[in-house]
Amino acid sequence: MKNKNFEIIAMLAWRNVWRNTRRTILTLLTIIVGCAMIILLNAFAKGGHDQMIEDATGLVMGHIHIHAKGYWENKTIDYAFQADETVEKVLASNNNIRAYCQRIMCDALIAKGGITKGVMVQGVQPLRELQVCGLYKCIIKGRYLSDSDSTHAVIGATLAENLKIDVSDTVAIISQGFDGSIAAEHLQIVGIFKSGNPEYDKFLLQMPLKQADETFSMMGYVQATVIRASRLDDVDDIVEELTSHLHNDKYSLEVLGWEKLMPELVQFIVMDDVSGYLFDLMLFLVVAFGILNTIQMSVYERTRELGIMKAVGTTPGQIIALIMTETFVITIIGVVVGVALGIGISYYFTVHPIDYSQFADEIAVWGIST
């Protein structure tokens, strides 16, 4: 008997939904557009955030850093560690790691023709660096470093402009060595890069790791191992696994993911997510009020009909069930079509992304590539 009642209620609800076709279609359009917008905007936000993270980590930073404990807070040459065979084995055995490289990092002074500037020196492994970060793609003059280079360097375009130097010019750098001595070297500029990130373009100098080891008396020690994960979603798992192997009595190392390395970016993404959730809530309320208005109008115009139904023995519970079933039918149709439309449009823009190259100069101010 209950099944029979349900069949009757479902049949009546379906007929009532399409009795006023215009109002039903308008309500469905409200639900469909609202759901599609929520799916599409969240897809754009997720894609935009992932692209921002890749742009921020792709040039120089990398997804994960391994440091001597305390380096990231102090950033001095004194905090260094030796990447021995055990560390290499741990990194090589992790299938989620695409590539990694060692770096020597310290602050220094760079001078040319009476002009002196502060600079961040990075000693890099050129061949490995190509697999970890993409700074080599930003070379606008000359070339990137190679494994055969020694006293050679690449610098940012703004730094080159401030020092009034060009490719093939020689500069002097001076700093403190790892052993406390004075470290000084003459370097020939082989390339100039323009990354779009003002900090890198103004302060960064890269030189070969072997030469940096000699210049700064590092004795095989490095400041960082920089890691690129196979997928951005793998970063947390890699950090957890590496920490379990490298943060113990033998190795006092800290493993930091991009979220710890760039907290400002994390804060921006969180704020953007909050604003996105508020907009989603507004769309949801618009859709909800649209459905409520439709049901309210449907009830008001059917007062006589509902009275007759009650007079012939229909219980209040059955009448409420009928109205709720009508609401459910309209909602489920709108949500299914809206979600499908939103996913379809999102997939289209995944396959055919929007070309922002015409806005490259404006976007570059934020350090985002196009």
Image: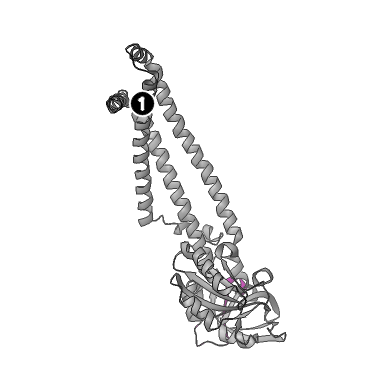
For the N terminus, the quadrant is top left
- Type of amino acid under label 1: Arg
As displayed, is residue 17 above or below residue 33?
A: above
Q: Give x and y (percent) for residue 279.
A: 51, 41
* Picture quadrant of residue 110: bottom right
The magenta segment is 146-159
Compare residues 317 and 210 and report the one nearer the observer. 317
Q: Residue at x 63, y 72 (%)?
A: 203
Compare residues 345 and 336 and report the one nearer the observer. 336
Q: Give x and y (percent) for residue 181.
A: 72, 87
Report the side of 329 relative to 205 (left or right): left
As displayed, is residue 81 above or below residue 317?
A: below
Residue 150 shown in magenta: yes
Q: Residue at x 57, y 57 (%)?
A: 266
Residue 110 shown in magenta: no
Residue of label 1 = 23
